[in-house]
Image (cartoon, rainbow, N blue to C red):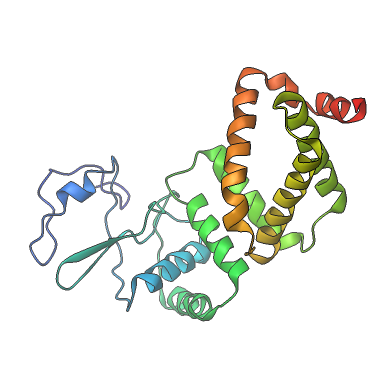
């Protein structure tokens, strides 16, 4: 044990109160953390709300990960939000604030908040690299500080999409332009409101577009330089 963090353990030595061996589950992670708090919650959903409130309370490595209920069912909140240097120290004042934050999150019906909370917990988990964490957090800032989207950025995005796909993938420029506009509209709606009805239709399409463009970038990154993309649009 070091600074509240469990650095190692003997496989098979961890048993829950009901006698169920937990070692095989915990073996999935190369670093484990001790429990400095135990939370009794009515549902798995509430556990997720509390995780969010814990991360809002202050910078820390404290996070819910494993929960048990009768008759021995285990629940996991994954990925574990153990990103941070020190565990939380919760006194009476902090407990009051935490309860308030939990109540606000539990009672919220705001889809934008739900999306930001999910992104925030992912960003403060052990999963992303520091670069990915920065991107996730910067998008949250955009969601908070830019309540409306930019027509100019939307147009440039769609135009570059159309020209690039037409030149490098023999795509129809008109349809590609419409596709680019649809992508940006969906992205903007998600960023600014947390939902978009067209997501089920455009989701698979953007996955394929990203796959194609990333493949091209991997072999010819110079094609994505700002000046090259501008020239592609001007060239007609």
The image shows a total of numbered marks equal to 0
> Is there any visible trace of residue 228 in the rendered image?
yes
Is residue 35 toward the left or the right of residue 11 in the image?
right
Q: Residue at x 56, y 47 (%)?
A: 204
Q: Give left or right: position of 17 versus 106.
A: left
From this viewpoint, is residue 134 visible? no
Looking at this view, name the residue that lies furthest to the left: 19
Quadrant of the frame with the C terminus: top right
Question: Residue 20, how many percent across, how many down?
Answer: 10, 60
Is 38 placed left or right of 147 in the picture?
left
Q: Position of residue 152 (x, y in %)?
A: 87, 48
Residue 50 placement (x, y as % from top left):
42, 70
Figure check: 66 above or below 101: above
> Which residue is located at x 31 percent, y 72 percent?
39
Q: Position of residue 87 (x, y in %)?
A: 39, 57
Residue sitting at x 28%, y 62%: 75
Q: Residue at x 54, y 63 (%)?
A: 117
Q: Residue 90 or 154: which is nearer the viewer?
A: 154
**What is the quadrant of residue 156 in the picture?**
top right
Q: Is residue 9 left or right of residue 157?
A: left
User: Is 33 or 118 nearer to us in this picture?
Assistant: 118
Report which quarter residue 200 is drawn in. bottom right
**Image position of 45 with respect to 131: above or below:** below
Residue placed most toward the observer, 210 or 104: 210
Answer above or below: position of 144 versus 139: below
């Amino acid at each position: 044990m070091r600074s509240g963090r469990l650095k190692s353990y003997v496989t098979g030595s961890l048993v829950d109160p009901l006698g169920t061996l937990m070692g095989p589950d915990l073996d999935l992670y190369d670093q484990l953390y001790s429990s400095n708090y135990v939370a009794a919650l009515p549902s798995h959903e509430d556990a997720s709300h509390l995780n969010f409130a814990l991360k809002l309370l202050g910078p820390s490595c404290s996070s819910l990960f494993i929960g048990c209920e009768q008759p021995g069912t285990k629940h996991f909140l994954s990925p574990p939000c153990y990103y941070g240097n020190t565990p939380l120290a919760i006194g009476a004042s902090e407990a009051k604030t935490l309860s308030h934050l939990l109540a606000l999150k539990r009672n919220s019906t705001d889809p934008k908040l739900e999306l930001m909370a999910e992104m925030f917990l992912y960003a403060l988990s052990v999963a992303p690299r520091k670069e990915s964490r920065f991107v996730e957090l910067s998008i949250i800032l955009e969601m908070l500080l830019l309540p409306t989207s930019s027509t100019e950025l939307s147009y440039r995005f769609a135009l570059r999409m159309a020209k690039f796909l037409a030149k490098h993938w023999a795509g129809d420029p008109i349809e590609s332009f419409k596709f680019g506009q649809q992508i940006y509209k969906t992205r903007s709606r998600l960023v600014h409101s947390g939902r978009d009805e067209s997501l089920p239709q455009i989701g698979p399409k953007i996955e394929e577009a990203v796959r194609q463009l990333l493949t091209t970038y991997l072999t010819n990154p110079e094609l994505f330089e700002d000046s090259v993309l501008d020239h592609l649009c001007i060239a007609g």
